[in-house]
Image: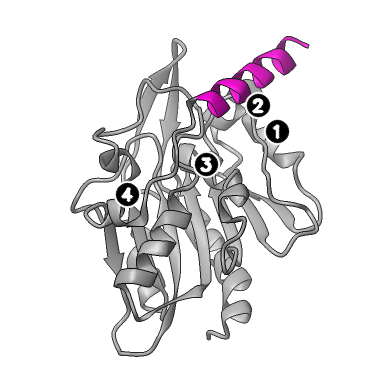
């Protein structure tokens, strides 16, 4: 019962803290575009950052992998667009779940090679929580995401989604079974219980938080120490999951 009250409080605070969505033009200096070679129109995957934010010259490990397969990537610098270096100290209030929609609208203005009817959204840690709750921001849009990929959703103690289990968007949640941050207050378990229909939960053996990152280390929260660590085998499994969801839908090899 106490956990339910905390969950409801977190959701209420998140709703109250949610700012109005930005105009797409506001993101012009806060998106890192990466396109595959050629002149053909291509689909795009929009990457939504975690608690640490995204540097101006950052290059996600996913960028080269996608572009080598004919898919564009948009890395969104959500914290920087709001004058912040990162999201530390802000609580888990879904502050930027609408950014993918705004960046997609920006692509229509500035990126003629991007086919904005074919897109997916991928979020990491705190960003994973944001993308799980991004369906509402696409209401009234010309198209919704083909798929949403939530990597180790990082808002402690709760996991929900506003995507329907029988809806048009495939939702994939990926967690390593060694993710001690996910198991703290059981956001791992709550995410797992979402599975059914178009929502799929994937357990990656031996993987910690941040398994698809480039560095290892630890962070402190609530008086405890939690680990993040890359895992090449888990990355290969994750890539297979992502490609299986996108390639047939986008007619890619």
Front position in the image: 26 or 164: 26
Q: Report x, y in % for residue 163.
A: 69, 50
Residue 189: which numbered mark, if any?
A: 1
Type of secondary structure dominating the magenta stretch: helix
* Of the two numbered discs 3 and 1 in the rendering, the one whose residue sits closer to the viewer: 3
Residue 186: which numbered mark, if any?
A: 2
Q: Is residue 204 magenta?
A: no
Front position in the image: 249 or 79: 79
Residue 214: which numbered mark, if any?
A: 4
Q: Quadrant of residue 148?
A: bottom right
Q: Earlier in the sequence, mark 2 or mark 3?
A: 3
**Label 2 neighbourhood size at 10 Å, few (<14), some (14-19), many (20+)?**
some
Using the image, determine if residue 160 lies above or below residue 166.
above
* Of the two numbered discs 2 and 4 in the rendering, the one whose residue sits closer to the viewer: 2
Residue furthest left in the image: 57
Residues drawn in magenta: 1-16
Does the CB distance between marks 2 and 1 fall below 8 Å? yes
* Of the two numbered discs 4 and 1 in the rendering, the one whose residue sits closer to the viewer: 1
Q: Residue at x 27, y 59 (%)?
A: 32
Q: Is residue 4 magenta?
A: yes
Q: Report x, y in % for residue 115.
A: 45, 78
Q: Earlier in the sequence, mark 3 or mark 1?
A: 3
Using the image, determine if residue 72 lies above or below residue 91.
below
**Label 4 neighbourhood size at 10 Å, few (<14), some (14-19), many (20+)?**
few
Q: Earlier in the sequence, mark 2 or mark 4?
A: 2
- For the residues labelled 2 and 4, the Cα–Cα distance comes to 25 Å
The answer to whether 85 appears left or right of 203 in the picture is left
Residue linked to disc 3 = 130
Tag 3, which secondary structure? Answer: helix
Front position in the image: 196 or 32: 32
Tag 4, which secondary structure? Answer: loop
């Amino acid at each position: 019962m106490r956990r339910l009250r905390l969950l409801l409080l977190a959701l209420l605070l998140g709703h109250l803290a949610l700012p109005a969505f930005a105009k797409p033009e506001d993101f012009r200096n806060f998106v890192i575009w990466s396109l595959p070679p050629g002149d053909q129109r291509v689909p795009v995957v929009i990457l939504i950052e975690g608690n640490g934010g995204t540097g101006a010259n950052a290059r996600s490990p996913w960028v080269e992998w996608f572009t080598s397969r004919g898919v564009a990537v948009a890395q969104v610098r959500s914290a920087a667009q709001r004058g912040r270096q990162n999201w530390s100290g802000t609580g888990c209030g879904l502050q930027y779940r609408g950014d993918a929609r705004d960046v997609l609208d920006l692509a229509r203005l500035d990126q003629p090679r991007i086919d904005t009817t074919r897109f997916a959204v991928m979020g990491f840690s705190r960003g994973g929580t944001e993308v799980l709750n991004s369906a509402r921001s696409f209401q009234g849009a010309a198209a919704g995401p083909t798929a949403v990929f939530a990597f180790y959703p990082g808002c402690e103690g709760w996991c929900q989604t506003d995507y329907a289990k029988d809806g048009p968007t495939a939702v994939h949640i990926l967690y390593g079974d060694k993710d001690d941050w996910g198991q703290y207050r059981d956001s791992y378990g709550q995410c797992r219980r979402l599975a059914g229909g178009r929502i799929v939960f994937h357990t990656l053996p031996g993987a910690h938080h941040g398994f698809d990152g480039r560095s290892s280390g630890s962070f402190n929260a609530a008086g405890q120490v939690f680990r993040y660590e890359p895992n090449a085998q888990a990355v290969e499994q994750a890539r297979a999951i992502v490609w299986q969801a996108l390639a047939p839908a986008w007619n890619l090899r």
